[in-house]
Image (spheres, grey):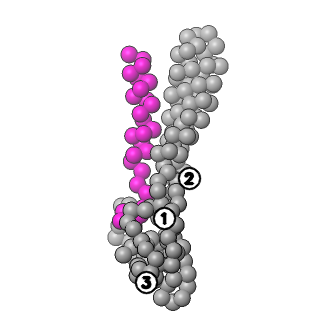
Amino acid sequence: MKSGFYAGILLLPLALGACSITPSSNTYTTAQAGTLQEVKYGTVLGVRNVMIREDNAETGKVAGGVIGGTVGSDVGQGKGQIIGSVAGAVIGGTVGIALDRSIQTKQGVEITVRMDDNRTVAIAQLADEPFTVGEQVKVLTSQDGKARITH
């Protein structure tokens, strides 16, 4: 019974991480939909592969700590239960951080664009559509300064 419970808890960070939506050239969050964006045009000068990682993900660390504390407490079975809980929480939190990084890291692309006004800008976003040097693109900028590049 307990092993099924622990297995279910171990899957919790994966399920919560899957709910995260990282903005890209083809994806808008509900907060972004319907917002005014300035449109400018430019030419792609360079494309570079990058990794994009969410820097505020705490799901794995918290879930790992809880899981580790629970497992550590059960291992102690009343003897050294506090020490087992603390050690389990620390180990679980460390494992959770590693899990978060793997879940929250996605393949991205940094696109350098020469704007029609001769400024040069670079934007990193998810690699959800291909860009090639020399092609014309749109640079969409929202009022909060966030930008994306689309065809």
- Identify the residue under disc 1: 109
Give the quarter of the image for residue 16: top left
Q: Amino acid at mark 1?
A: Val
Residue 119 visible from this viewpoint: yes
Q: Residue at x 56, y 18 (%)?
A: 73
Which element carries disc 1, helix, strand or loop? strand
- Residue 18 shown in magenta: yes
Residue 104 in percent (x, y) is at: 48, 49
Q: Position of residue 140 (x, y in %)?
A: 43, 76
Name of the residue lying farthest toward the front: 133
The magenta stretch is 1-28
Q: Which residue is disc 3 drawn over? A: 41
Using the image as rendered, state which of residue 114 and residue 61 is in the foreground.
114
Q: Residues within 10 Å of mark 1 (few under 14, many from 20)?
A: many
Task: Tell me the kind of residue under disc 2.
Answer: Asp
CB within 8 Å, label 3 to label 1: no
Three-letter amino acid code at the position of disc 3:
Tyr
Residue, disc 2: 55
Q: Quadrant of the C terminus?
A: bottom left
Q: CA distance from mark 1 to mark 2?
A: 17 Å
Q: Is residue 131 above or below residue 116?
A: above
- Count neighbours of disc 3 (C-alpha within 10 A) and say few if under 14, some if 14 to 19, many if 20 or more: some
Answer yes or no: is residue 144 visible: no
Q: Secondary structure at mark 3?
A: strand
